[in-house]
């Protein structure tokens, strides 16, 4: 499976999504949510993770420096979130494909319902026709649960 960080319309290859990477991201997320950890430490942890994950050359291109104190803090956050998105992308695509298959299977039913809804006068005619039917035939048809 291929994973990619997209940053400033450029793609950077990501390593295989392993339990180790998942655990590291989980720890970063916990740290970022903590009120007891300094902002500097939060940014430094994300910065180190991005550098380790994409490699020092790609990190230099993303951050435009290899000096942490000179890095735009938003670049750190955006690249970290981009890595998360890169690992989530295949799952989202698979879910979309599965949902698309389910929609295709129900497509004929949906199309029939849409045709009825597009012409409410036809639905009204059908209801009036059923209402005019003798009570015995309505109950045999199970008209609207009556």
Image (cartoon, helix red, strand yellow):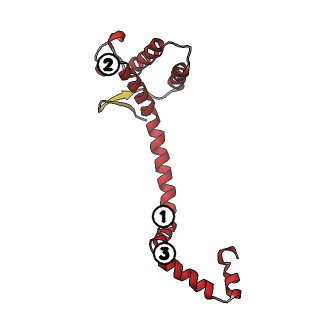
Task: Decide which of tag 3 and tag 1 comes sooner along the chain.
Answer: 1
Q: In this figure, which residue is indicated by the disc labeled 2?
A: 63
**Residue placed at 50% from the left, 65% from the top?**
110
Secondary structure at badge 2 equals helix
Label 1 near label 3: C-beta < 8 Å? Answer: no
Q: Nearer the viewer, residue 8 or 95?
A: 8
Of badges 3 and 1, nearer the viewer stands 3
Q: Is residue 21 above or below residue 136?
A: above
Q: Nearer the viewer, residue 93 or 121?
A: 121
Quarter of the C terminus within the rendering: bottom right
- Tally of marks: 3
Within-10-Å neighbours for mark 1: few <14, some 14–19, many 20+: few
**Residue placed at 48% from the left, 70% from the top?**
117
Residue 35 falls in which quadrant of the image? top right
Secondary structure at badge 3 equals helix
Of badges 2 and 1, nearer the viewer stands 2
Q: In this figure, which residue is indicated by the disc labeled 3?
A: 120
Secondary structure at badge 1 equals helix
Task: Decide which of tag 2 and tag 1 comes sooner along the chain.
Answer: 2
Within-10-Å neighbours for mark 3: few <14, some 14–19, many 20+: few
Furthest-bottom residue in this view:
134
Q: Tell me, for residue 91, which label it has, or none.
A: none
Q: Position of residue 23 (x, y in %)?
A: 55, 23
Q: CA distance from mark 2 to mark 1?
A: 47 Å
Q: In this figure, which residue is indicated by the disc labeled 1?
A: 107
Task: Decide which of tag 2 and tag 3 comes sooner along the chain.
Answer: 2
Q: Position of residue 20 (x, y in %)?
A: 53, 22
Q: Is residue 77 above or below residue 95?
A: above
Within-10-Å neighbours for mark 2: few <14, some 14–19, many 20+: many
Q: CA distance from mark 3 to mark 1?
A: 20 Å
Q: Position of residue 89 (x, y in %)?
A: 44, 38
């Amino acid at each position: 499976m291929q994973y990619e960080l997209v940053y400033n319309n450029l793609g950077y290859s990501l390593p295989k999504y392993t339990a180790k990477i998942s655990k590291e991201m989980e720890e970063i997320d916990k740290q970022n949510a903590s009120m007891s950890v300094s902002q500097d430490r939060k940014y430094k942890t994300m910065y180190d993770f991005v550098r380790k994950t994409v490699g020092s050359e790609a990190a230099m291109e993303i951050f435009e420096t290899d000096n942490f104190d000179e890095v735009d803090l938003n670049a750190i956050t955006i690249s970290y979130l981009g890595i998360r998105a890169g690992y989530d992308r295949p799952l989202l695509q698979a879910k979309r494909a599965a949902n698309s298959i389910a929609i295709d299977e129900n497509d004929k039913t949906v199309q029939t319902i849409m045709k009825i809804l597009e012409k409410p006068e036809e639905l009204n005619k059908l209801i009036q026709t059923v209402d005019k039917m003798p009570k015995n035939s309505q109950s045999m048809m199970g008209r609207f649960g009556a």
